[in-house]
Image (cartoon, helix red, strand yellow):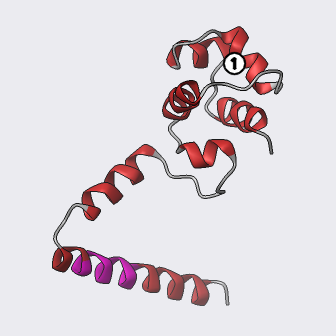
């Protein structure tokens, strides 16, 4: 998908009008419409504002990844990244165990 298509899809998923997204991103609804139709490309500053307004990463917005990192998840990842090495390893061990347990439950649930 193009940048414009991604903006339109995310905007609609969040029940925002072009005007409302424009206000959140400090631009106009008319410009949001032009971005969505891929008539013009926004500056990097505007892409950052739109991504922040939609609560996604720039990579997700521009289609570089299909992994959507919302702001809450990103904040948590940043907090973990700032911890000392041993603390990070302890957190990773707990997360790995929880993921393993979840996958195991899903496997048995689907049988």
Please determine whether, in this image, residue 14 is positioned above or below residue 81: above
Q: Secondary structure at mark 1?
A: helix
Let me know if residue 97 is in the magenta part.
yes
Q: Residue at x 67, y 17 (%)?
A: 17
Question: Can you identify the residue that label 1 sits on?
Answer: 32
Q: Quadrant of the C terminus?
A: bottom right
Q: Residue at x 68, y 16 (%)?
A: 18
Q: Residue at x 79, y 40 (%)?
A: 2
| x, y percent for residue 11 | 66, 29
Tell which residue pokes out farthest to the front in this image.
43
Q: Quadrant of the N terminus?
A: top right
Give neighbour class at mark 1: few <14, some 14-19, many 20+ (Cα, 10 Å). Answer: many
Span colored in magenta: 89-98
Please determine whether, in this image, residue 25 is positioned above or below residue 66: above
Left or right, residue 37 beside residue 95: right
| x, y percent for residue 22 | 60, 15
Most common secondary structure along the magenta stretch: helix
| x, y percent for residue 106 | 57, 82
Q: Residue at x 39, y 82 (%)?
A: 96
Left or right, residue 9 beside residue 24: right
């Amino acid at each position: 998908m193009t940048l414009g298509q991604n903006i339109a899809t995310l905007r609609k998923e969040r029940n925002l009008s072009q005007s409302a997204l424009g206000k959140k991103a400090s631009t106009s609804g008319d410009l949001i419409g032009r971005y969505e139709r891929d008539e013009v490309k926004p500056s990097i500053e505007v892409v950052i504002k739109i991504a922040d307004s939609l609560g996604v990463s720039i990579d997700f917005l521009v289609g570089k990844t299909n992994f959507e990192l919302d702001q809450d998840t990103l904040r948590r990842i940043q907090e973990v990244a700032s911890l000392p090495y041993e603390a990070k390893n302890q957190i990773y061990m707990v997360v790995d165990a929880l993921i393993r347990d979840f996958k195991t439950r899903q496997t048995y649930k689907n049988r």
